Image: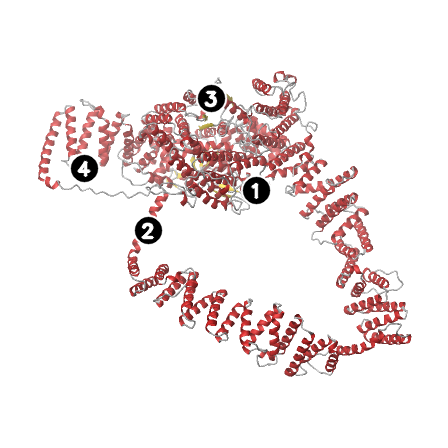
Amino acid sequence: MATSFQAHVHHSFEVPSSDLLLNPRGVPSLTGTGRHSIGSQHGPRKSSGEGNSTLANLVQSLGRRGSSELNSAKIIGADYEAILDWIRAERMRKLPPEGSSYDKVLVWARLFVERLHTFDSAIQYFEGDSRMAAELAYIHCASLLELGDENSSALLDVFGFFYRCSTGLENLLHRTELFIVSQSIKDQLILALADLVTLVVGVATHCHRSLGSLASGSVSIDIYSPFTASIKSFRARCEHVSEMMWRHQLLGAGFHEDKVTQVKTVKNWLEPEDPVLSNITEFTAHFAQEREESTCLWMAPYLTRFLKSEQKTLSISGKPGSGKTILATVINDYLQHPTGGVMYKSIFVPINARIPANTTPRATAKSILSQLFSARIGNVQLYEILSDAYDHCRKSTTEEQYDNAIWHALGLALQANLKGSQELVLVVDGADEASCGQTALVNRLRDATLNASNLKLIILGTQKQETSTTHTAVQLTPELIFDDVAAVVRKIFQSCSAFCELSEEQQEVTVIQIAETSGGSFLWAKLAAKRIKDEHAPHGQDFVKAVDALAKAGPSITDLVVHRLDSKVSEEAKRMMVWLATAIRPLTLRELSTLLSVRVDKQTIVDVGVDPLMLLRPLASLVFCQNNMVSLRHGQIRTAIIDTVNKGKLFSTLGDRHVDLVRRLLLYVKLNVTDEDEISETPVSLQRTSKLLERFPLLDFALRYWVAHMKTALGTETDQQIHTVGKELGPFIPTKPVAPRLEMTLWQAKPTPVLLSWHNLQTSLYRQTLTVDHPATQQAIICQVLFYREIRDIMPTEASHIFYHAAIICQKALSSQHVITRRMIQDFLESTTNEVTNSRTEIMIRRTEMLQLLVECYKVQYGQNSSIVISTLTQLVEHLKYIKEERKAQQIATSLQTSLTETATSQSTTSHQSDGSLLVHLHGRKPSVQEGTTFALDDIETDEPISQTMNSQSSLYREIESHMRSIKEETASWSERTSMESNFQEIISSTSAASSSSIAAAQKLVEMYLSRHQWRDATKALKAILLRVWPSFFTPSAQDVELPSENVGHCIDLAERLRNCYRFRGRSAKSEDVSLRLYYSMRRGRPIEDGLRERFTRDLLHLYERKSQTDKLIRIHQDILDDLTKQSKEDHPAVLQELRTLAGLTRPRSAAVGYHRLIVRILNKDSKTCHPDAFESLLIVATELLGQGQYFETREYWETLFNTLRHPNINPKLQDQEFVKSVYELYTQCLRMTRAGLHVIHDVTVQYRSICQTRFGATASITIQSTNKLLEICLESKRYEAEAVQLCEQLLNTQSSEVDIDKEGLQAILDAHYEEQYTSIASASAESVSSEQLQRVITIRQDRLSTLRSTYGWAHEASLSEMKELVPLYTKRGEVQTAVSLLQEATLQIVSKETSATKLATSAQTIASSFISIGQVQQAKELSEELYREIVIKETGATDSVLPRGGRQSLVFLAHLQYTLREQREVSLTVSDIHSALCAEYVYFERYRSEARSKSSTLDTIVAIAARLYGLLRARSQVSTAARLVEDLANFLVTSQKEKVQMSFGEARVFIGTLLDYFSVYTTKNFLQSVAIAGYRGVTQYLATRDYQAACNLAVAAFKYIQAHNGFSSSLSVVKLLFNLGLTISGQNLEPRPDSTTRKQMLSASSTIMSPTLAYCKQANIDLTQLDHVTLNKLIKLLDAQRGYANLAWLLTGLWDNRDKHPPSQEEATYTLALGRMLVITRYLMGEYMAAIRLAEDIVYNCVRVHGPQHPSSDEMTVLLSRMYASVAQGYQDRKEHRELAYRYYKKAAALHENALRAFVDPTSLASPAIDSGTSSPSSETGPPSPGERSEESGKYVRQHLHLLKLAVERLGNWPKDYKEYESLNSALFQAFGDDLKGIEGVDKWNLKEFGSGRAEASDDLISHKSHPAFGLGERFAIAV
């Protein structure tokens, strides 16, 4: 099988070859949307057996293997109805053109599925699981269909292959009543279904697996080679069922067994002689897939009418090249569908001059009979006819006799019909190319079919046939096929760039010009179009000139062929073309390549290493390759090449082309067939022949056909002609005797007359060239004798002559006693038995001579006195007497008598000895593998063929034999070695497992294996021994292993050796398992201190350590710990050591803490201090628990550690200051986290200070630090105030060089203490304090404040504190302004002089709190605002006081000031927030001022700064400042961008405000993209608030700015945003609707944006089809409102091209139909008339196919298409040169309405194959209604079509067809729709003469808005969501 995914990528000029090219595709899954799973789709059904049947098991196996390759993880059910629904939905989704590859894929897929369903239904009565198997095939068919239309070429090949391959089922289905006659038939039918399902699943899985994860590109696969076995098995299965059915019928009819077995013989006799030609009919039928789209459509009405009529013959005539072959294959395809509810059986017979071997009448008759015999299974009468014909033909010695017998049998066979059989349709193509001529062939066909009932005959040829009541004819006129020719030319031109440059009108005119010039010849049109295309015209006008020139020149086909051969074609390619024209059949690629390697001049074979396909590529228009067979494309091409060769134009020295070819063939045979065989009577065996033919590719063709080509070269077979040719061929004749024997093997299937001629010619040529003494000649003569033996009863005289000369030659060459000589003599004598006379005739003289030779032969072979010699002598004596030669007879009789006497004497003397036994040596026949060896379906795990028996010739049988031989050889090589092993094993097995002899034998056996490094054998032996001596060692769980009761050491040694064997074999897991079992056995059986146990434990631990298997180490150590704990106390050193080991192994895991805690508990017991050995564990536990936050648990451990500090000798770490310090700190941390009282921490700290003083000294740094720490704790409570004072004084008096003591701080503490005593007085109320006291306090404070300011500065903490205390005192005295002035002065001084952030912060807080304390908050806020303006904005305030323009450090002061003054609603603000905002504002104001002053600044740079500033201002409610910022920036935009963007200040202000608002929140990486986002959001907000003017201004301003700055190319996101902006501003969905003026303004703004945006989308190839349907509908409506048809067409085209992204469904079909209709209308409005028309044609075709012609969708699109036809024709009408084109469109319009009306009259008239029958969705038609059924709307549609038909023919001015057809149609219409047509004129009243030239009585058949409001593209045609 050959096919290709991606149409013919591998060979551009060929029909599919040997590979599949797959393209990956992601499509919606049919298999993933099914309704049921396989296992549950159906209820219980009758099964073929109990439990799961073999078929069910196969389905489950295939399902499991196939599911992983499908798109979904689980195969979901796709039953018969589901897949047909999917195909219909897919058709409406893709709308493939009629005749396109994908259209045919869907057709063939449906046909195959229907055939499979029919077969399933036929066998499900006895095999309930057949439905499951069929549905598995449906699923995988669906998975193939999901590969999509991009793989249509490959899918077409695959489903075509499935359909052709399953033809055997179709033939069986004609005799379903025989399915149940025997169980064998049932079984074979079930297995046939299994084979077919296996094949389908295998092919589908292979395709999907070949794709894999490929994302792009293609992959080539072969779908025949991997499944050859499955294909052969399936076909053989069908053939076997057929034979069993025949057998049942014949035996039932009383036939003898011999006759029954002759069925296969008859079938083989009818097959082609050459196996290469056996599939020619099938391959030719496949040509229907090569027709161009939308061609041969005219044929359907003629064919349907013929089939439904009573006529028996249809003749289709046309000149050569008019497309009859393709038409015949299309007719054959049509016949695969029911027509008018009737299913026909087609027999297709292609006759083609390209294949001379199939052009004879004999080949035609045999082809018909072969197909008929296959289709009429069990027809006993047919078998009798063919059996008699076979016998008669075997006896026919002349061509005429043979042919007459065949044709006579054909006539009888066509009459032998079974009751209820389908009507036959015989399609014979190429009658004109038959070797006998068309007239003779047609006469024979008519005679053969004359008396046949239930038969129709379709003949295609060149001669026009006369019509009659039983015979109708169709003439393929140029007018009839004009559109098809134009379609072919158009297809060729479409790939030419110059042609695509032309306008639609120019393109159409150019195509029409070539089509008209072709005169109705597809061949001429193709060759001419390809010639023009290959000239590569640079421009459109050059292309037009080339077409004009060729049309004017009008070259013949021969001229075109010669031109192609002369254009850059190699000599090798030309030679191949001559061979293809000469050869009697097509040649394979290997044959062509081999022919090129034959060097006649040098008589050698030299491999040239060239690819014939590459050489023939320039000649792609003349040849094609199919299944590696290369042939010429047409018989006329063959004729042209032959004429050219005969005229000497290609090769002047070639001579006779047949002789040249014969030379090459014979030389090839001579040089390759070189075996030195002896002369023999037997043909070469088939096996040897097959090997030779496979080894030498050309050998088969050479041996089969060299004689035929030589006969053609001879012309007449006279001796002189043979002598002449013999001289030329002499040097090339094969000289080995095996060559004639090979020919005899390959010629066996040839007819008797042919063999008679060929053998005579062969022997004559051998005699002429090699002489009769040459062994090859003698072998040829013997082969001739072997043939004459078969016909000696028919031709006794000729046979006797041949036998006599052969006997003479063999006597001389082989001796008289040779067995061949004897056979020749016997043949002569037997053949002349009936010619014996008593006169001395030549025959009698020769008989005498032969009898004498026979006597001599017998004497040598049997002895002189043997009985056979005596019998022969007696016969010779009688013969001589009979011819009156008495003397010679007497002499022989006398010698004979003497011999008899001697023989009797001899016998008497030896009688006793000879009376013994007769020794006979008998050799028993070895049982054949074929007998009793069956294969059950359950055993099939892979895609291997399922067969019941094993053929001894099969590859599997040979493989088994080879395997058995290899086993025997291997057995012989080690038999000696195994004898010793067997002895040891016998000892082991025969004695007790525990005996010494058994142990010794085991040791020796293992030692032997180990010494040879036979680790595997040693392993097996050790395991076997251990199973006997230590069975518990192999318990499932290693922990259950127990030590054996005896021979423990021996067992352990064996186990160790087993472990080592595993280690040497690299089986580490096994080795570890053995070690583990040894360990557990020791643990269970030995104490812990046992040395052996310790060793195994240590080995296992070392193993785990090497492998770093910590978990396993821990488990073993835990076992050890458990054992130690049970045996010893917990404080035993070994226990503690294991605990430490486990703790080390488990760190840092939490388990380690547990082990350490155990150590601490065991050693410390209840002690408050730590045991020296537990110190490290205690430290680890305390640290780990503290780190985990377990403060309560760790407190105990830290307390122990702290207590241990008093004992420095316990651990060296206790002498380290840092360690001691860390213990204290962590312990106090733990105390605080556990909420210990301050007194506890105080006590611990006192102890800590004491320890430090004692251990490290009073002046040590740690001691001083501990004192400071104690001071801090004392300061936390008044309770320790005295102690704190004491500590401060001690520290002030302490001198240390190691630590800096903060004496100022200490002094401050003391001062604070003393100050507190004074404060109590100052804090009294004003009434309780006298003015003098208050004044005194103020004076003291003022003096102190002055002193502090002069000493430390204004911002010092002491100064601030003092000022804070002073301000309330002023207030108490009523001097508020003085207090305010004091604070303002402090602010001035601090801001202007202080730089410390800390001091600034403290100052601000102090001042603010002071303001608050005296109730002057407003004064403080005014001060804050003034500071902000002068520090941040750099403005001078309006107040009289002049504050300094402080730097950025002043912001700290301002931040803290504002923080302290914040209101209650701002309580969540932190000082950091305020300070950050102030810093940001400060920085952004600085940058903004800098950018504003810079001449190089741009909007994006300044907006980036201003927006952040704007956001900060808005966030902090600085509204007025933000507004001033917007105005300032708007002025900048207007002035700086005026050259690029024209914008008013108002527009700029809206635009800038939007940008600042957006960029204050968002950052950007692409400014223009962000502008688009901001504009879109702003417009949306304005529309929401109904501020339409602002929205329009913003949208236009944003778009202008982006467009001015090349925003389209900056980012795809920008384009998307502008697209959304354009849609949004159009206001389509606004509620309530704005007024009309506003809507107009918004639509204008939208147009301003959308037009450039869509233009850029086109330019950048941006796909808008991925948008959701809501958005698409909005865009379509918008473009419709704007009259943007160019953009609308582009959008709809994109949607159309991407419609396969949606899953096929009924809703999707509606979507596709609506979309297609919109695209048709839009294209028409665009002026793209041809594109609109072709799409409309596709929609009409698929609507009719899916819904039927009466469906509203079909009718609506038909009317639309006809109106486009008429409107386009009107455009051509006014131009004289195009008027003929206009008339063609009027005819098309008329034909549309005529066909529609015929469908209404008789819906079945278009049922084949126009309508996909079967189940459908509820909203679609289920098939064509019957003629009696009518829908309610039918009358309206009929009136409309009749009216439009009238207008079309009026514009045409005459009737397109014979008026009788319209009259008949009119009568049928008024009869069926009389009530609906009341008032309507019939065709008899139409006056066409009044109109014509494009005029009609009305114009409603033309496109107009009035007649077609649908062209508004409004909401009615928006895509449904």
Q: Which amino acid, by three-letter code, is at mark 3?
A: Thr
Pointer 4: residues within 10 angstroms few (<14), some, or many (20+)? Answer: some
Badge 3 vs badge 4, beta-carbon distance below 8 Å: no
Q: Give how far across and how far down residue 906 sits, in percent.
A: 10, 38
* Mark 1 vs mark 3: in front: 1
Q: Which residue is mark 4?
A: 861
Q: Which residue is mark 1?
A: 28
Q: Nearer the viewer, residue 1535 or 239?
A: 239
Q: Earlier in the sequence, mark 1 or mark 2?
A: 1
Q: Which residue is mark 3?
A: 313
Q: CA distance from mark 2 to mark 4?
A: 44 Å
Quarter residue 826 falls in: top left
Pointer 2: residues within 10 angstroms few (<14), some, or many (20+)? Answer: few
* Mark 1 vs mark 2: in front: 1
Q: Give how far across and how far down residue 323 sits, in percent.
A: 51, 28
Q: Which residue is mark 2?
A: 967
Label 2: state its secondary structure.
Answer: helix
Q: Is residue 1691 left or right of residue 447?
A: right
